[in-house]
Image: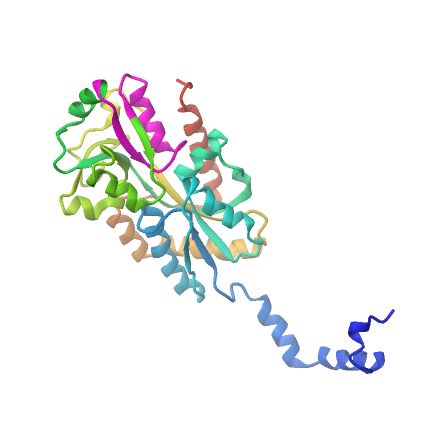
């Protein structure tokens, strides 16, 4: 049956078939098809589920630049903050699984998966690798009245203190909860924008900040902020004199980590291309320099074939440390 829209004002069906057959044998046509199979051949969107200026944004901009050099396509950064990273992650999961979108996925968003706040599951993403891991700490304004962690705890026993965090259900909140379970009166205040979170203690809207040293390095170097304790099993590089919370009876120490993911169901060939590119970037001198600048663990990188096990372990760590689990 001939469709009217294919009639082309009286041209015969035979003419169309003849024209089609002629096109099929043209070398330029087969060359075009071959070109369309190349991946990537156009820009790849790099979604950051947080506002500009924070650790996730810094990671994406550094890795994105290195990936552009490797893949020979641009990777425009798209910041979509909200819901502890879930608003931006929804952007990734609503995009076609065609390999044209990647996203930053971090420990704070993992917390929302554990608590059931997220409307997706871990199996919905395909990891390309964990790029950076950093100890988490508590930071105060440089001229804050608390000189030591002991001073802060003593005050928090009798007065409500506000703690700036990334979002509810995050490891940030878990670190604060372990202190509240032993009599402290910290009230968590979430800030989706890193800039707002950082300025919260400088402007007096929060008393302490839960963050990583590398992410606020400029504030530390300019003497606007200072660390007061780290939730870590080992001293923070560059701040070895700052106490560890575990030595004061708070053993939970969940490092902040940031990974890169694609949507599950993406063509395995596309995944393989991106996985290889990410691994090459992680091994580069430029990226190792970035880890040092961020005061991150030197062995931060976890390759794609080991990331699933890493994420499962982190999921279980957060789950076992939720309120009521102790």
Identify which residue is drawn at 27% across, 53% down.
Answer: 289
**Magenta includes 11?**
no
Location of residue 215 with respect to 37 vertically, above or below:
above
Would you say residue 298 is visible in this rendering? Answer: no
- Residue 20, image x, y percentages: 76, 78
- 21 sits left or right of 141 in the view: right
Extreme residue in the right direction: 1
Location of residue 161 with respect to 280 vertically, above or below:
above
Q: Quadrant of residue 250?
A: top left
Tell which of 118 and 273 is nearer to you: 118
Q: Quadrant of residue 6?
A: bottom right
Would you say residue 126 is visible in this rendering? Answer: yes
Q: Quadrant of residue 184?
A: top left
Say which quadrant the C terminus sits in: top left
- 186 sits left or right of 126 in the view: left
Say which quadrant the N terminus sits in: bottom right
- Residue 55, image x, y percentages: 32, 47
Tell which of 188 and 64 is nearer to you: 188
Identify which residue is drawn at 38% across, 47% down.
Answer: 50
Identify which residue is drawn at 53% across, 37% down.
Answer: 119
**Magenta includes 170?**
yes
Tell which of 96 and 253 is nearer to you: 96
- 173 sits left or right of 184 in the view: right
- Residue 4, image x, y percentages: 82, 72
Location of residue 172 with respect to 44 vertically, above or below:
above
Tell me the magenta residue range: 158-186
């Amino acid at each position: 049956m001939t469709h009217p829209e294919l009639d082309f004002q009286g041209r015969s069906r035979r003419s169309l078939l003849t024209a089609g057959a002629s096109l099929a044998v043209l070398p330029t046509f087969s060359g075009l098809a071959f070109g369309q199979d190349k991946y990537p051949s156009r820009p790849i969107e790099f979604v950051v589920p947080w506002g500009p200026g924070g650790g996730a944004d810094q990671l994406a901009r550094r890795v994105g630049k290195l990936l552009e050099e490797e893949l020979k396509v641009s990777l425009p950064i798209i910041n979509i903050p909200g819901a502890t990273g879930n608003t931006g992650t929804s952007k990734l999961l609503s995009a076609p699984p065609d390999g044209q979108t990647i996203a930053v996925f971090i420990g704070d968003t993992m917390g929302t998966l554990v608590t059931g706040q997220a409307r997706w599951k871990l199996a919905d993403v395909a990891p390309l690798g964990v790029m950076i891991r950093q100890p988490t700490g508590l930071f105060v304004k440089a001229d804050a009245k608390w000189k030591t962690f002991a001073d802060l705890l003593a005050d928090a026993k009798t007065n409500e203190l506000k703690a700036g965090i990334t979002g509810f259900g995050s490891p940030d909140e878990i670190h604060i909860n372990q202190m509240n379970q032993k009599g402290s009166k910290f009230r968590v205040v979430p800030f989706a924008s890193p800039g707002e979170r950082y300025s919260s203690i400088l402007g007096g809207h929060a008393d302490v900040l839960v963050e990583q040293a590398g992410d606020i390095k400029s504030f530390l170097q300019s003497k606007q902020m200072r660390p007061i304790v780290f939730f870590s099993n080992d001293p923070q590089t560059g701040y070895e004199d700052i106490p560890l919370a575990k030595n004061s009876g708070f053993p939970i120490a969940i490092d902040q980590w940031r990974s890169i993911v694609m949507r599950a169901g993406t063509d395995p060939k596309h995944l393989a291309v991106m996985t290889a590119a990410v691994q090459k970037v992680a091994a580069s001198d430029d990226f190792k320099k970035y880890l040092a600048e961020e005061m991150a663990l030197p062995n931060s990188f976890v390759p794609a074939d080991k990331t699933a096990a890493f994420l499962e372990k982190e999921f279980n760590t957060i789950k076992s440390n939720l309120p009521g689990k102790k």
